[in-house]
Amino acid sequence: MNTTCRHVLIAVGCLVVFGIFQVGCKPSQQTPAHVIDMHQQMKLQDPRPWPYQPVSMTFHPLSRFRIVDGVPSFVQIRIELSDRDGKPTRTDGHLVLEVQAVDDEIRQVSLDLTDPKINSEHWDDITMTYFIPLELALAPGDDEATRLIMEAYLVRQGVDEVLMDQLELVYEPPVSSEPEDS
């Protein structure tokens, strides 16, 4: 058998094999319109909620002040979401935090957790919480207690209930052990 015949047989064989796989992969007909309509309706009004969606939200006990040079410079906020089984879970939606120090204006932070990048940046795999650090504007040497009132709200598309939690966080500066001059 000469080289040209061999190449022709290999080419025909490849086309036959490729053709068999293509025929096997193609649907026999187009998806009927009533199935497409049903799919669209299910996407818009799926009566079955995702079983692991959050049903509660709390400030995790690891939420705390971060002390730098003896002054609370940051507040480390951790938000835990729990599903109906009480297990930590992630979500998509908008997480809104309101932080207010005594006699200070409310500071608001909003995270769009529907954005996968933002969701991943704030998710902590170890504690299974969303982590949000906030810088505080306190002057070094401030001997007064720092008290923050924090509220968190979670709003999700297609869910009527807004989850909410509140936490009061207090930092008491350490008492100096040096004797006072008389």
Image (cartoon, rainbow, N blue to C red):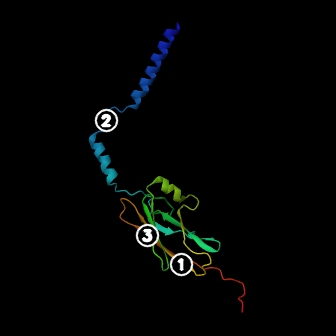
Q: Nearer the viewer, residue 90 or 75?
A: 75
Q: Could you say which quadrant of the image residue 144 lies in?
A: bottom right
Image quadrant for the C terminus? bottom right
Question: At numbered mark 3, what does the secondary structure look like: helix, strand or loop?
Answer: strand
Rendered location of residue 140, percent (x, y): 61, 75
* Alpha carbon distance from label 1 to label 2: 64 Å
Residue at the location (54% across, 72% down)? 137
Above/below status of 44 relative to 88: above
Q: Are marks 1 and 3 in contact (CB under 8 Å)?
A: no
Q: Of the residues shown, which amino acid type is indicated by label 3?
A: Met
Tell which tag, 1 or 2, sits nearer the viewer: 1
Q: Which residue in the structure is indicated by mark 2?
A: 30
Q: Of the residues shown, which amino acid type is indicated by label 2?
A: Gln
Horizontally, residue 171 falls left or right of residue 43, namely right
Tell which tag, 2 or 3, sits nearer the viewer: 3
Q: Which residue in the structure is indicated by mark 1?
A: 147
* Alpha carbon distance from label 1 to label 3: 20 Å
Rendered location of residue 30, percent (x, y): 31, 35
* Alpha carbon distance from label 2 to label 3: 47 Å
Residue at the location (34% across, 31% down)? 28
Rendered location of residue 139, percent (x, y): 58, 75
Horizontally, residue 123 falls left or right of residue 179, namely left
Q: Which residue in the structure is indicated by mark 3?
A: 164
Q: Of the residues shown, which amino acid type is indicated by label 1?
A: Arg
Residue at the location (51% across, 11% down)? 6
